[in-house]
Image (cartoon, rainbow, N blue to C red):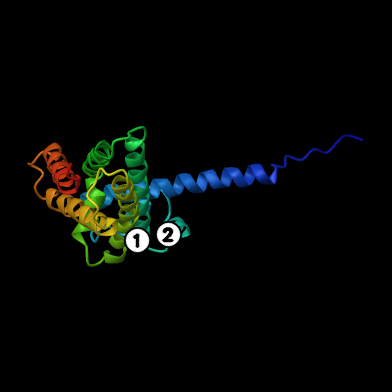
Amino acid sequence: MGSNKTNIVPLAEASGRQGRRRAKTRAELLRAAQQLFASRGFHGTKVADIATAADVGTGTFYLHFENKDALFADLVKETSFRMREEMDAAKSGLVDPHEQNRAATSTFFRFAAENRDVFRILFGHSVEFDTLLHEVHALFVADIEQSYSEGVDAKVFQPFRATIVAQAIVGMLSQLVSWWLDHQEIPIEEITDTAHRLIRQGTTRDV
């Protein structure tokens, strides 16, 4: 009696394959949305446009995101996390707090220039995305507050309250990026250098 073999894919393997496909589709939707937001603006882009650009059905879009606002929120958050990772990597191995600040500031502005479309939409709709912008700010305020506290302990920075300094720095950098998006004739390198000098001169402890 011949054996009757069935081609059954192990559950774990099938589940893993499905997860990878889902992640790939989600990434394609985010990439398509970013490109459309850049060319048409947030309000000029429809869910159907994003689905078509990603080569999926509209129903598939709603399997990944509740609506266009939810997609944009995820796009901004993921962009922020990537920026934070790049800033951490730039600071890695540096001991001097001033050099850490310079590396982080340079990375922030370079990243903003490379992802200006996301920043333009976020800052261009500050009322509409006020909560989202607050969440992004809070992420970087926490990092700067910790770094500044360590610099104060090392007697490199002025003994100001770290949370106030962190709010001031994030506010300044955010406003600079928002303004620069409409004044791109000014080199981002000049913006970066000016911001770093202001931070250094305003925070350095008197010897």
Q: Which mark is residue 207?
A: none
Quarter of the image that includes the C terminus? top left
Q: Is residue 79 left or right of residue 66?
A: left
Furthest-right residue in view?
1
User: Disc 1 vs disc 2: Cβ atoms closer than 8 Å?
Assistant: yes
Q: Residue 181 in the image: x percent, y percent?
A: 14, 49
Image quadrant in which you'd find residue 88: top left
Q: Secondary structure at mark 2?
A: loop
Alpha carbon separation for disc pair 1 and 2: 7 Å
> Does 189 appear above or below 136?
above
- Amino acid carrying label 2: it is Phe
- Does residue 53 appear anywhere in the picture? no
User: Secondary structure under badge 1?
Assistant: helix
Q: Is residue 133 visible?
A: yes
Q: Residue furthest top?
A: 93
What residue is disc 2 on? 65
Say which residue appears at 26% left-offset and 58% top-offset: 161
Q: Position of residue 108 (x, y in %)?
A: 25, 43
- At x 19%, y 44%, the residue is 204
Kindly identify the residue that appears in the image at 92 percent across and 35 percent down: 1
Residue 125 location in percent, x, y?
21, 62
Relative image position of residue 124 (x, y in whole percent): 19, 59
In front of the other: 19 or 60? 19
Neighbourhood count class around disc 1 (C-alpha, 10 Å): few under 14, some 14–19, many 20 upward = some
Within-10-Å neighbours for mark 2: few <14, some 14–19, many 20+: some
Q: Which residue is mark 1?
A: 68
Front-most of 181 and 174? Answer: 174
Q: Amino acid at mark 1?
A: Lys
Q: Is residue 134 left or right of residue 56?
A: left
Furthest residue toward front: 207
